[in-house]
Image (spheres, grey):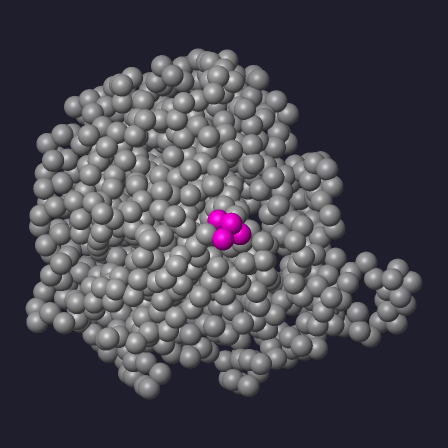
Amino acid sequence: MADVTMRIWRGDAEGGDFQEYTIAQNEGEVVLDVIHRIQATEAPDLACRWNCKAGKCGSCSAEINGKPRLMCMTRMDELPEGTVTVAPMRTFPIIRDLVTDVSFNFAMAERIPAVLPPPMPEGGYRMFQEDVERGQEFRKCIECFLCQDVCHVIRDHEDNKHHYAGPRFFIRYAELEMHPLDTNDRRDYVREEMGLGYCNITKCCTEVCPEHIKITDNAIIPLKERAVDAHYDPIAWLGRKIRNGSKRSAAEAGVQPAP
Amino acid sequence: MTEYEHHDYDVLIIGAGGAGLRAAIEAKQRGLSVGIVTKSLLGKAHTVMAEGGIAAAMGNIYAEDNWQVHFRDTMRGGKMLNNYRMAELHAKEAPDRVYELEQWGALFDRTKDGRILQRDFGGHRYARLAHVGDRTGLELIRTLQQKVVSMGTDVFMECKVLQLVHDSAGRIAGAVAYWRPTGEFVTFGAKAVILATGGVGKSWKFTSNSWESTGDGHAMALWAGAELIDMECIQFHPTGMVWPFSVRGLLVTEGVRGDGGVLRNAEGERFMFRYVADMFRAETAESEEEADKWYADHSAGRRPPDLLPRDEVARAINAEVKAGRGSPHGGVFLDIGSRRSAEYIRRRLPSMYHQFMELAGVDITREAMEIGPTCHYIMGGVKVDADTAATRVAGLYAAGEVAGGMHGANRLGGNSLSDLVVFGRRAGVAAADYIDAGSGPADFDEGEVAAAIERALAPFTRESGENPYDIQRDLQDMMQANVGIIRNGPELADALTQLDGTFSERVANLKVTGGRAYNPGWNLATDLPSMITVSKCVTRGAIQREESRGGHTREDFPKASAEFGTFNLAHSVSAGTYDGEFATVRSPLLTMPDELKALLEEAK
């Protein structure tokens, strides 16, 4: 097979630039294979984050020819002929080379009010497949943060990171909202504190999701509807008053008690 | 002297996979301060790679299932080399650990009446694996991660522990580590340390393991004075991808066979019927018709031989390839496409569908997969007390793959995820009890810290030296060739000579280029001592175990021997030092109580 030229961003928080490496290719390789070979030969200190190399851990996110993708699931032979450009995710601060500081996401995860099920009955909970399937779609998420990377609300507006959870966490809020057992009501919280309204459903997140989760259609839009209903729908509001809320407020259950 | 930051915790947990996270939850619930250190990001640990399910005798599909049958299956699968008490506790407690995951938000697949669905797997008499499609490990780690985060636990991510630190009385007092993003050092003081560092597979060329599986915890425990047992028992999972070459070794879940997939050779023959060992003959189907009936109803026929324990299946595949009946790329065929509907396959095995479609261009709903054995799991590990996960070093505990004994000579599929949560919890309980009893270190040996830091920095100071990647590649090639699935005396002796000689010297003289911040070459340089130490133990064990049993097959000793079935091989290093002399002794198995023996007899 012909050699390929890889144009890889090298640098750190102080700055950097693309460097070119020309290297042999083998049949069936993915971008991460080529990066590894460059590490093992020309550039042992080339920083890239990876773990499973099987599309299951979501560590090796990068922008390949400008598109946010997993390096381990992008075959070289599916890319157009010519130089392949690999850059770090742009939305997060650079640590080194292809590795970015994704701590924003972990900080957002800490702010999610926990799942709060009723006590478990003898013999375990009963839930039905069609009820768990909605949440299961969102629990396929491998936390590669490509959806966060591509979301223009934070990609182009650094300030929004303080009050915008981003698509990865909207699917988490949707999953909890649709969880058959959860009693914790986060609808006001996700609208007021997590910036759900900033999302203007351009579906960029859905396009880049390596797990093919329908982030916008199945999570964000239903979540927006439910959050808006909770706030503005007088009948729903009255219903909640009468039922005295089967779901508790988010603040009451910030930390889940021990079972 | 190098400056470094320092943190103090009651319990320090090294590793953030299933066992480490479960231990953390337990220690937090006891009101202790807990620090978790992981060399990757949170939620990326190798646990995410587990596919098929978590084994627990809940009896949701077959009411006749119970802990006694699970215990018996585990012991037989382990070729009776197991720590019986671990197998007993595991079988008894696994159901509670699964139900607990549901309380923390896990969403398992369901039966029609709304209970947790369970699937068939190799070596398990009944459908026993709770699962979520073929991504059960992800569900487990995400559930535990979310629970740990909701409890406000400190997690040190991309922070790699180099060595454990003692107090002046030899008790565990903490650890020394470095931050991968900056290359700066950090020390942790702790009253108790729980190792949950996973496995060792990265020392083999074809493995389902990620870069992390370098045996850090195995090596650190050994250096700190603990013993390692059963290190020769390595599981080669029968079904890893064989093509494209760049993904060779990548796991193909046993769930494919549990859900109806069968193995065929190049002639299309379902060859497993020719490889049924005497131990399993009575319960294994004799014909394709009988095997196929079993899938729908386990009382209508006996189990298909495709679902024998992993060691049996891996050896059979190896033999077929050797006999010239392999697939074009040196494996055999795994066929589910001709046996189940496309819709069923995509629903039950979505990751496998995706993996083959995207990486190999193979549509598994229509074509057979090419598969072959891949280094997957080490049964061996730190010798621990079954009830407490305590090692022989005061204050040091081990749980999950890094601990030995639970699985004997061969692990059954699905028993790993349950192992993580059963013994992760037990390690957390025991560490908390140890601390509550007022035990703990008196001081912190700064000398050990200084020595560990000096060793870690040495590769930067050498004028010249080898690239660590070259050493890693040669080690993987050598271990694959000499200490692989089928072994013999001369090749093992050659392996040990190389490990004690050239490899140890090369690692002592390697050179790292670049800076300390997020330098993968340096990180590998700090992994290599662990990889060499672990490889030495595996090889020494393999030389001394002159028989074939489970994940240890000697072509010069092809049968199991009654004598060798009475002990584990236990490794230690003299005076618990880093570069001491290795010693390997016979450590007798625990004596099983009569009522448990009876369970094994009844089932014959």
Displayed quadrant of residue B480: top left
Q: Measuring from the top left, give residue B186's x and y in whole percent.
A: 35, 69
Q: Quadrant of the N terminus of chain A?
A: bottom left
In the image, is residue B435 part of the stretch drawn in magenta?
yes
Q: Which residues are magenta?
A: B434-438
Displayed quadrant of residue B168: bottom left
Tell me: B359 left or right of A186: left
The residue drawn where x is 74% and y is 41% is: A121
The residue drawn where x is 9% and y is 48% is: B501
Q: A92 or B592, which lies in front? A: B592
Tell me: B25 left or right of A73: right
The residue drawn where x is 60% and y is 47% is: B101
Q: B136 or B389, which lies in front? A: B389
Q: B245 or B437, which lies in front? A: B437
Q: Measuring from the top left, give residue B158's x and y in whole percent.
A: 38, 65
Tell me: B193 left or right of B185: right
Q: Is residue A183 above or below residue B237?
A: below
In the image, is residue B18 part of the stretch drawn in magenta?
no
Residue B423 visible to an observer of this rendering: yes
Count up the numbered dots: 0
Q: B309 or A20, which lies in front? A: B309
Q: Is residue A112 above or below residue A198?
A: above
Residue A97 visible to an observer of this rendering: no
Main secondary structure type of the part rendered in magenta? helix
Q: Measuring from the top left, give residue B373's x and y in whole percent.
A: 30, 37
Displayed quadrant of residue A35: bottom left
